[in-house]
Amino acid sequence: MEEKYKTVQILQKSQNSGVFHLILNRPSVRNALSLDFFAEFPKALHALDQNPNAAVIILSGSGDHFCAGIDLKSLNVIAGDHSGDRGRSGERLRKKIKFMQDAITAIERCRKPVIAAIHGACIGGGIDIVTACDVRYCTKDAIFSVKEVDLAITADLGTLQRLPRIVGFGNAMELALTGRRFSGEEAKELGLVSRVFGSNEELMEGVRIIAEGIGGKSPLAVRGTKEVLVRSREMSLEQGLDYVATWNSSMLLSDDLTEAISAQIHKRKPLFAKL
Amino acid sequence: MEEKYKTVQILQKSQNSGVFHLILNRPSVRNALSLDFFAEFPKALHALDQNPNAAVIILSGSGDHFCAGIDLKSLNVIAGDHSGDRGRSGERLRKKIKFMQDAITAIERCRKPVIAAIHGACIGGGIDIVTACDVRYCTKDAIFSVKEVDLAITADLGTLQRLPRIVGFGNAMELALTGRRFSGEEAKELGLVSRVFGSNEELMEGVRIIAEGIGGKSPLAVRGTKEVLVRSREMSLEQGLDYVATWNSSMLLSDDLTEAISAQIHKRKPLFAKL
Amino acid sequence: MEEKYKTVQILQKSQNSGVFHLILNRPSVRNALSLDFFAEFPKALHALDQNPNAAVIILSGSGDHFCAGIDLKSLNVIAGDHSGDRGRSGERLRKKIKFMQDAITAIERCRKPVIAAIHGACIGGGIDIVTACDVRYCTKDAIFSVKEVDLAITADLGTLQRLPRIVGFGNAMELALTGRRFSGEEAKELGLVSRVFGSNEELMEGVRIIAEGIGGKSPLAVRGTKEVLVRSREMSLEQGLDYVATWNSSMLLSDDLTEAISAQIHKRKPLFAKL
Amino acid sequence: MEEKYKTVQILQKSQNSGVFHLILNRPSVRNALSLDFFAEFPKALHALDQNPNAAVIILSGSGDHFCAGIDLKSLNVIAGDHSGDRGRSGERLRKKIKFMQDAITAIERCRKPVIAAIHGACIGGGIDIVTACDVRYCTKDAIFSVKEVDLAITADLGTLQRLPRIVGFGNAMELALTGRRFSGEEAKELGLVSRVFGSNEELMEGVRIIAEGIGGKSPLAVRGTKEVLVRSREMSLEQGLDYVATWNSSMLLSDDLTEAISAQIHKRKPLFAKL
Amino acid sequence: MEEKYKTVQILQKSQNSGVFHLILNRPSVRNALSLDFFAEFPKALHALDQNPNAAVIILSGSGDHFCAGIDLKSLNVIAGDHSGDRGRSGERLRKKIKFMQDAITAIERCRKPVIAAIHGACIGGGIDIVTACDVRYCTKDAIFSVKEVDLAITADLGTLQRLPRIVGFGNAMELALTGRRFSGEEAKELGLVSRVFGSNEELMEGVRIIAEGIGGKSPLAVRGTKEVLVRSREMSLEQGLDYVATWNSSMLLSDDLTEAISAQIHKRKPLFAKL
Amino acid sequence: MEEKYKTVQILQKSQNSGVFHLILNRPSVRNALSLDFFAEFPKALHALDQNPNAAVIILSGSGDHFCAGIDLKSLNVIAGDHSGDRGRSGERLRKKIKFMQDAITAIERCRKPVIAAIHGACIGGGIDIVTACDVRYCTKDAIFSVKEVDLAITADLGTLQRLPRIVGFGNAMELALTGRRFSGEEAKELGLVSRVFGSNEELMEGVRIIAEGIGGKSPLAVRGTKEVLVRSREMSLEQGLDYVATWNSSMLLSDDLTEAISAQIHKRKPLFAKL
C-alpha cells in the first residue's frame, strides 16, 4: 500500500498528530531534481492529499541541503533531444517543461498545507519548489539563489511567477537578474520565509510545533483558507469576495463550527473530525 | 440631521480641520462586530462621504481595544438559521455574508481617505476592517491575529483578498493558516501598518497630524489618488496607465492645480475649495 | 551615428564591458523632466536596445540629484492649453499624458535590464521613472517623495500602477496620499531599492560591478528573465507558467546553454555571443 | 406598502403565477428616461427581488413604444451644470453617470430573470436597458438604434459594454458607429432578441407563456443559472468551472432537486417552494 | 494495449487516415452519462492524444441519439451522499463535480481536434460535451436542450461557461433559463454547429471527409491553431498576440513549413510527418 | 509632405468629405503582403490619424482582389533566416512577428474608424487585416479563407485573437482548423461583415455613403465610441462601465453636444469642428 519512491520519502514521525513529512531524498547529490523526481513528487503529494490521516505536510531535504536545483544530467537529457525538425522538437520540449511545472504546482493543488523547512542550499529548482509551498521556514545559514540565469536559462518552473507575489516585483527582478546568493536572514526580510531558526534541529522542532498547531485546527477551515487564498490571488477583489461568500455558503455550517464555538465558550481544546 | 448610531460614533474634534473621527463604539465588548454594526457602518461612511466638510476620516476603537472581531452572538444567529432545505439555507447564508462584506467594502467606496488608528486587540473581523482602510497606524502594544481559522471559519469578510496585496502572498498565507498573534512592530515590518506609536495618546496625536496634512491637500488630487490606486489594483499595467490618463484628462485642469502651482512659487500654503 | 540629446546622455565608460550609462543631464534644474525629455528618453533607450554592444543600462542623474520631477514650465504648457471646447481639450490632454507615459514605459519595453542608480532627490516624476526600472539602488542620503499630490495632481506617469507591485498596496497608498519624504534606508526596508550605498562614489562603483555581472551572463537568459517577469505580472499563475514553457520551447536550446553547462563543468567563466 | 412610482409601474396580472410586470410608464414622451426614472427603477427592481411572490419579471413599455432613450431635458440638466472649476465639474459628472449606470445594472443584480418585451422604438438608453436584461423578445415592427453617437455622445450607460457580448464585437461596433436603425427581424439575426412576434398582443401573450414557464421551474436553479452565467462572463473558463462547482456544493442538494427527480420519474409537473 | 471501456469505444474505420472515432457507447440508455463514463472518457482521450497515428477525433453517439445527459442513477448517487456534516458533505460534492468537469475539459486539453457529430438527442450533459469540442456538426433532426434547469440543477459541467463564447451571451441565457428544445437548423443559426446534414449517414460521411481534410494538414499547425485559440480566449488581445508570436518563434520553422511551401509551388499535395 | 508609398496609396476622392481611402496597391500580386507593406501600412495610418481633415478611412484593395495574404517571398525571407543558434534565431523571429503584428494593430490604435471594403479574395493575412478593422463590408462574390493552416502555419497576425470576438469561438475554430473558403453571404451570416453588396461598384458607393454618414457625426463621439468599445473588450463589465463614465466626465461636455442638441431641436443637420 505504501508506495516506494526513489527520490522522495514519506514519514509520519509521531503517530497521533496529523503531521506528515515529505523528504527530498537524494542527499548524495544535494537532493538535485532528476526526471524521476518530477514523476514521483506529485504522486507522493496526491497520496498524502487522499490520506485522511494527513492534515499537514512538512517538506524538507535529507542530508546537508534542502535542494541544489535541477541536476545537470536531467538537463542534458532535455537539452540533448534534437531529433526531428525544430518545430517538433520545440513542441516536445514545451510538453516536458509543462510536465515538470505540473509536478511543482501539485503543491498548490494539494488541499492540505505544505510547509517548507529549508536548511543549507536552496538553489534554482529549490526556489521553484519552496515558492509553491504555503509557508516557508529556514535556518540562519540557509543559502538561497535564483540560479537559473547562470545556467543560461530563463527560469521556467514557477519562480518567475510565484516569487514576485511573495517578495514583491522589484525584489524578484533583482534576485532573478543577478542570481546572487542571499541568506536566511535576508529571506526573512524579503518575506520569503516567515521565521529563521538557529540550527536544523531548532528548525525541525519549531516547524513540527507549528505544523501540529495547524493540524489541530478545523481541517475544513484550513483547507478553505488555503484554497480561497490561492484562488483569490488570480481574481479581482470583488470576485474574490464573492467566491469566498459562495464557498462559505457551502462549508461554513459544519460540525467544526459548532465544536469550535463550544470549545471557545468552555475554554477547552476543540476536537475536529478528519477531512 | 445627525443620525444616531448604536455601534459607531461620528466626531469632529476640531471644527476647522476636515478631519472626522469614526469610532467603533461598543467598548464593553471590545467593539465586537454585531449585525447592527454591519447595517450602521456603511451608513455612517456614506454620510461622511457626502459631507462636504469631511476631508479625511480616522477610524478607531473606543475603550482598550480596536476590535475583537465578530461577536459570537451574531455568528450564532447566522449559523443557527437552518430553516428550509440546504440549498435555500445556503442561498440565504451567501446573501448574509455578502451583506456583511459590503459593509466593509464601503471603506473603499468612500471617496475620502480612511485611516485606521489601531490600539489594543485587532482580531479577526478587525483585520477585515483595517485591511480595507487606506492607511494604517498602530500602537506598539497592539495585538493582531487573523483568528477566523480558530473558530473553524474560512475568513470571508475580505482578509484573504486584501491582506496578500498588503503584506505579500506568503506572509498572508502564514498568518491566515496559523492564526498566530503578532505585535505592532511586526505589523510594521510586514507592511501592514505604516508607523508604530508608543502609546494610544501618541497614536491619536500622530494620526491627527497626518490626517490634517492630507486634509490640507487638494481634495481632488487626494480623491483621485485613492480611486486610481484602488482601480489600478485590478487592472493590467497598461490599463491602469490608460485609466489615469483618462481620469486626468477630466480632473487635472482644476482651480486646485493653479492654486498649488501659485502656492509653490510664492512659497505659501495653498488653500483649496471643498469637494 | 551617435545622436545628440539635450536632456540625456549616453556613455560607455569601459570599452570592453557591455555596460552603458544613460544619464539624466540637466543638472542645473536637478534633472527636472521637460517636454524634450519625454521625446528624447525613449529614443535613447531604443538606440541602446538596438545596439548589440549594450548588454545592461545604468540610469543615473548628473549633478547632485537623480531627478526633481516634472518641471513646472512643462506642466504649465500642458495645463495652459485651454483652446477649443472642454471635450476637445480633454482629448488633447489625454493624448499628451499618454505620450509622456509611453516615454517611461520604454524602460520596460527595452529588452535589456535598466538599473537605476539614485542619489540626492528622487521626487514625483523621478519615482515614475525608477519604478519602471528593473532594479534600483541608492545612496544613504537619497530622498524620495511621491510628490504629485502636493501639486494637486493625481500621479499619472506610472507610480500609482507600479509602486504597489514593488512595495505592496498599503505602503504605496500611504506614500501617495501623504507625499511624505523617505530616505534611502526606508526605501530599502520598503523593497523599493535593493541595496543602499554610503556615498555616490560607492553607489556608482557598486552598481557598475553588479551591471558587469549581469552583462557577463547569457544575454538570451537575461532578456528572457526580464520579459517573462514583466509579462507574468499581468497573467494568472497558470498563464504565466504556460507562457514561460512556450518561451523556453523556443529559446532554451541555444549555444548559451551549451556554453554555460560546459563552463560549469570545467569551472571556468562562460563567454556568450551578443544578442 | 406598495410604493408609488412616477416613471414605472409594477403589475401582477395573474394572481397565481409568479410573473410580475415592470412597465416603463411615461407613454406621452415615449417612455423617455428622466432623472426620476434612474432613481425609481432600481428601487422597483429591488422591491421585486425581495418579494417572495415574484419569480420572473417582464419589462415592457406602456403606449406605442418601449423607450425613446434619455430625455433631452435630463440631458440638459446634466450637461448644463458648469458650476465650479473643470476638475470638480468633471468629478460631479462622473458621479452622475455612475449613478445612472447603477440604475441599469440593477437588472443584473436582481436575482430573478428580467425579460424585455420590446415593441415600437427602442432607442439609445432603451438599448442600454434591454442589453442588461436576461432575455429579449420583440415585435416585428420594433425599431432599434444605438443612437447616442447622433447626440454627440459616447454611449455611457452600458451598451458599449454589453452589446458586444450579445451580438459580437464587429456587429456592436457597426451599430454604435453608424447609429443606424434596425428592425426586429435583424435584431433576431444579430442575436439581440430571441424571438420576434407579429404584434404587440402576440408579444405580450408569448412572453407571458415563456415567463410562466420559467416561473414554474425551481427558483433555486433559475437564480443559480442567472448568477453563474453573469459571473462566468468575467472569469476565465477554469475559474468559471470552479465557481459553479463551489456554487453547487452549496445549492445543488435541495428539496427542489428531490422534487424535480420525483416529478420526472412520475411524469408529473413539479412544484417548488418560493425563494 | 487497446484498453477496453464500458461506456465509450475507440474505432479507426480507415487504416490509412489519421481519423479516429470516439463513440459514446451505451445506446440502450441513449448514451446517458454514468460515473463510469466520467472516469473512462478522459482516459480514452488521453490515449488518443498520445497515439501518433491519431490526427483527428470524431466524437459521436451509438444508436439513435448522441447523448441524453447525465443518467438519473448517477445523479442520485451524488445527491444521495449525505454522510457527515454539511460542510464536509459540501466539500465532497465540490470534489465530485470538479472530477466530472475535468473529464469534459479533457477534450480541450487533447492536442488534437475533436469534432462532434451529433444526431438525435443532445440534452443536458450532452451540451456540456459538445460545447467543449472544437467543431460541431449535426443532423437536421437533432434535438438540443440545455435541460439542467428542469432538473432543478444549475448546469455545472461547462455549458454556462462555454455556450456564451459560442452563441453569444444573450442566446446562452435564453437557452439556459428556458431549457427549451431547439433543432439542428436553429443550432446552425445560433453558431452552435457549423453545418447541418440531412441524415445520420450524410453526417458521418460529411464529417469523415472534413476530418480527413484536417488530418491531411500539418499536425504542428493544426495543434498550434487549437492551442492558440483556446489560450487566447482567456487573454487580452495584446497578450494573445504576444503569445502566438512566442509560440511561432518556436514552432513556425519546421519541416512542415518547407513541405507546405514546396507543395504549394509545385501544386502537389503536401505530406507531413506525424506529431 | 505627402509621403509616397510602394505598397499602399492614400486617396481623398471628394475634397469636402472627411472620407479618405487607404488602398492596398500591389494589384499584380493580388495585394499580397510584403515586408515593405508591414513598414508602410502603420505609417500611412499614422499620417491619416494625425491629419485633421481625415474623419473616416476606407480600406480596400486595388485590382480584382482585396488581399491574397502574405506573399511567399516575404515568408521565405523570414523562414530562411537560420543564422546563429536556435535560441537567438527564435528571439529574432519573435521580434519579426511582433513587428508585423504591430503593423496590423495600428488599425485599432488609429483614433478614426477604419472601414474595410472587401471584394474578390480575402485570404490569410487579408483576414488578419479586416478583423482589425472597425466595420467590414464586402461584395457577394468575395472569397474568404483563414488559409494559414494550409501553409503549415499557426496564424500569428491576429486572426486567432480577433475572429472569435467577431464570429464566436466555435465558428472561428471551425474556419481556422479547416481553412475552408466561404462566401460574402456566409461572412454576413457569421457576423464577419455587416452588409453584402452586389458588385464592387455598389460596394464602393455604399461604403462611401456610410463613411460620409460617420464622417458627418461628432468626431469626438465617434472617436470615443471606437476607443471605449476597443478598451471595454479587455475589461470586466464593471471596469468598462467605470471607464466610460471617466471618459465622459472629460469628453461629454463639448461644443459638439450643444450643437447636436440644438440641431435635434431645430431639425437641422449638425456641423462639428474637426478633431
Image (cartoon, coloured by chain):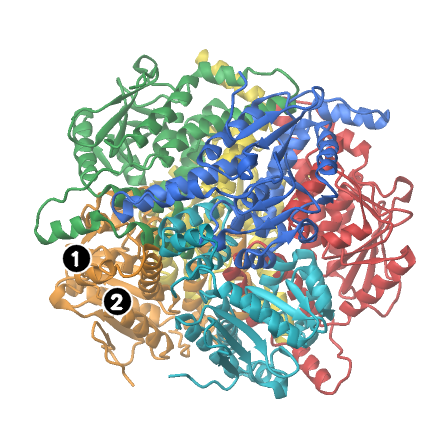
Chain colours: A yellow, B green, C orange, D blue, E red, F cyan
The subunit carrying tag 1 is C
- Which residue carries the number 1 mark? C121
The subunit carrying tag 2 is C
Percent x, y for residue A246?
56, 32
Image position of C93 (left or right of F195): left
Image position of F43 (left or right of C35): right
Percent x, y for residue E193?
76, 55
Q: Residue at x 73, y 69 (%)?
A: F183
Distance in Å between CA atoms under marks 2 and 1: 14 Å
Check the image and report above or below for B71 versus C219: above
Q: Secondary structure at mark 1?
A: strand
- Which residue carries the number 2 mark? C59
Check the image and report above or below for C272 versus A262: below
**Figure quadrant of residue C88:** bottom left
Q: Residue at x 47, y 55 (%)?
A: F228
Q: Secondary structure at mark 2?
A: strand
Check the image and report above or below for A127 versus E87: below
Q: Amino acid at mark 1?
A: Ala
Q: Residues within 10 Å of mark 1 (few under 14, many from 20)?
A: many
Q: Residues within 10 Å of mark 2 (few under 14, many from 20)?
A: many
